[in-house]
């Protein structure tokens, strides 16, 4: 059994920040939530590596965040994931944190109208990729002495049913089971595993989801947006910065005993 390291910090406020120098990998981190998470860790003094299938967005992020390293990869392709970890070893020399942010929206529509290819692609990207990344990351996390942590990005759709989005919801629920099982498996090695469940996040991706759902329901985009807000107790969307702040906390000394948790950042979405 791994010997637990004592909590050492100079003040209570220090315990709420991840220590500088953490080696962090953010998958699908070139844009959206992933990019905000990557920048947040970089601002906290972490050494950050980002992979993404979009090499143009990766180049833009690298230009905006000097010192950040990158890999172009399709997270659903095992050989691409292997290449990412070769790059991580070269760039960082090891790994303390994996933020597994990979995910796509998948198709919108009644289950009887969905194509098999759409289902399989959603499973490949949203679920199989997490298996590939975890398999390569875990040996590096076990070797870390810096409060190692694996964060899986799930969704509020990982705790609620989501009509017309069955492929997406199914994969996000599956990630919770994967995370909770890994937390038990890796706990004796001192590796913590948690999931963040973002709700309705402001931005282009959510605009696209709302537009697709509006089209499927035969209503206006504005009406669908208002419907989404009515389902949220706080009546507002969250931001990518809200999600990034939670990721930072989960990698701080203050969270050293938080593992196996599915943490919603959603303003309390009541139903979907």
Image (cartoon, rainbow, N blue to C red):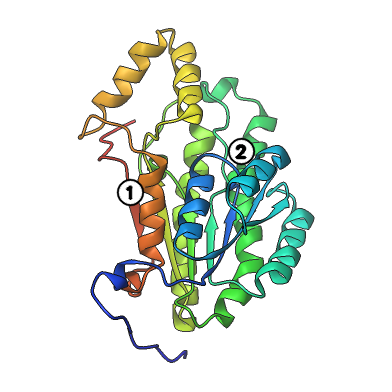
User: Badge 2, how many Cα within 10 Å: few under 14, some, many 20+?
Assistant: many
Quarter of image, res 54: top right
Quarter of image, res 137: bottom right
Residue occupying the point 46% across, 58% down: 43
Q: Which residue is mark 1?
A: 264
Quarter of image, res 122: top right
Label 2 SS:
helix
User: Badge 1, how many Cα within 10 Å: few under 14, some, many 20+?
Assistant: many
Label 1 SS:
strand
Q: Percent x, y for residue 135?
A: 64, 66
Image marks 2 and 1: residues in contact by CB distance under 8 Å: no
Point out the frontmost of discs 2 and 1: 1
Mark 2 or mark 1, which has the lower sequence index? 2
> Foreground residue, 181 or 52?
52
Report the Cα–Cα distance between label 2 and label 1.
22 Å
> Foreground residue, 180 or 58?
58
Judge from the rendering whether residue 78 lies leftward or rightward of residue 257; answer left or right.
right
Residue occupying the point 46% across, 71% down: 20
Residue occupying the point 39% across, 45% down: 241
> Foreground residue, 112 or 98?
98
> Foreground residue, 256 or 260?
256
The C terminus appears in which quarter of the rendering?
Answer: top left
What numbered label is drawn on residue 122? Answer: 2
Q: Percent x, y for residue 255?
A: 33, 69
In the image, residue 251 above or below residue 99 = below
Judge from the rendering whether residue 160 lies leftward or rightward of residue 28; answer left or right.
left
In the image, residue 230 above or below residue 258 = above
What numbered label is drawn on residue 69? Answer: none
Judge from the rendering whether residue 60 lies leftward or rightward of residue 109; answer left or right.
right
Residue occupying the point 45% across, 28% down: 206
């Amino acid at each position: 059994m791994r010997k637990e390291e004592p909590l050492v910090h100079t003040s209570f406020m220090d315990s709420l920040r991840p220590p500088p120098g953490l080696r962090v990998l953010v998958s699908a981190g070139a844009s959206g939530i992933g990019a905000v998470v990557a920048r947040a860790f970089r601002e906290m003094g972490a050494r950050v590596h980002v992979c993404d299938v979009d090499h143009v967005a990766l180049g833009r992020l690298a230009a905006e965040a000097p010192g950040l390293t990158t890999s172009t990869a399709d997270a659903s392709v095992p050989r691409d994931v292997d290449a990412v970890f070769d790059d991580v070893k070269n760039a960082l020399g090891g790994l303390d944190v994996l933020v597994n942010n990979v995910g796509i929206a998948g198709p919108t529509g009644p289950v009887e109208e969905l194509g098999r290819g759409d289902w399989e692609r959603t499973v490949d990207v949203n679920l199989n990729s997490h298996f590939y990344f975890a398999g390569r990351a875990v040996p590096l996390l076990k070797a870390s002495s810096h409060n190692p942590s694996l964060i899986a990005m799930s969704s509020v759709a990982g705790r609620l049913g989501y009509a017309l989005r069955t492929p997406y919801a199914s994969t996000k629920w599956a990630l919770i089971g994967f995370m909770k099982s890994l937390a038990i498996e890796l706990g004796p090695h001192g590796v913590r595993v948690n999931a963040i469940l973002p709700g309705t996040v402001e931005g282009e991706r959510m605009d696209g989801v709302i537009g697709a759902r509006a089209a499927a329901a035969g209503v206006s985009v504005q009406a669908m947006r208002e419907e989404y807000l009515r389902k949220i107790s706080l009546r507002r969307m969250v931001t990518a910065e809200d999600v990034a702040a939670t990721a930072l906390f989960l990698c701080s000394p203050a969270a050293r005993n938080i593992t196996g948790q599915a943490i919603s950042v959603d303003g309390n979405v009541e139903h979907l």
